[in-house]
Amino acid sequence: MKQVIAMHGWAGDNSCWTLWSRQFEQRGWHWFSGERGYGNRSPQSSEWVDGSTRRLVICHSLGFHLLPASVLSVATDLVLLGGFASFVPREVDGRGLRTALRGMAKALGTQQERTMLQRFLERAAAPLPLSALPPNALLRGISETGRQRLQDDLDLLAKLTALPPGFPDQADCLVVQGGLDQIVPPETQKLLIQSLNGRLKKKPTEMLQPNSGHALLTADALQRVLGWLERP
């Protein structure tokens, strides 16, 4: 059995995978989308189905760090879309990003919350308009528990220093990065590749989309991922 476990990033939800799940299921994959529960959706943990022999993990952004080690550790294939090991660049280069994370956290629960989220989502979508992405439920309101998870995960972003626990050293890995990413800086993108090269038994496949931003959930990115999976 071929199975996919997918995980969205910060301020997202599992509705972002609708197009992807349809295409994968048509190709015989069993699909499961994890859910962090930022909005009004209940959190959903992930686990592999008994008997699955090809186990693919697809993560967007922070989703790479939100899956349990028990899921990651036995993945046979790994696709990272706008992912990272450490999010904040080291030392001086990371000061601006740390300040931005603190500002986002400060806006949660205030009248500036929706404006902050709107600005973040617009930067994630760029150079596409926000309307090119699936509607985001957080712009219609956030639960108290969801707000706390957003806060916790901003803290997590600031503290990340390495690949997540349970990282599957044996997996085949595809890294898709946007050349116009306004969320993950170039230094962070480079550090991910360095970290992967230091751990993986097989060198990762790097796929730069020079005209794409951070929200690498488009039909074009999907076709590139399917092409990599179905390679001879």
Image: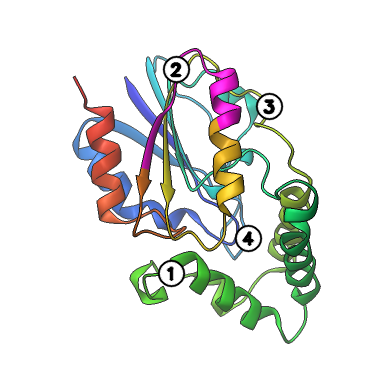
Comes first in the chain, label 3 or label 1: 1
Horizontal side of residue 83 vs 103, given as left or right: left
Q: Which residue is mark 3?
A: 165
Q: Nearer the viewer, mark 3 or mark 4?
A: 3
Of labels 3 and 2, the one closer to you = 3
Residue 50 tag number: 2
Cα gap from disc 1 to disc 4, whole angstroms: 22 Å
Q: Earlier in the sequence, mark 1 or mark 4?
A: 4
- The amino acid on which the numbered mark 2 sits, given as a three-letter code, is Asp
Pinpoint residue 44: horizontal percent, then vertical percent: 57, 45
What secondary structure is found at the residue carrying circle 2?
loop
Q: Are marks 2 and 1 in contact (CB under 8 Å)?
A: no
Q: How far is mark 3 from mark 2, CA to CA?
A: 22 Å
Categorize mark 1 by other alpha carbons within 10 Å: few (<14), some (14-19), many (20+): some
Which dot, 3 or 1, sits closer to the camera?
Answer: 1
Q: Which mark is residue 126?
A: 1
Q: Which residue is mark 4?
A: 38
First reached walking from the N terminus: tag 3 or tag 4: 4
Question: Crowdedness of circle 4 by 10 Å Cα count: few (<14), some, many (20+)?
Answer: many
For the residues bearing labels 1 and 4, Cβ distance under 8 angstroms: no
Q: Is residue 11 left or right of residue 103?
A: left
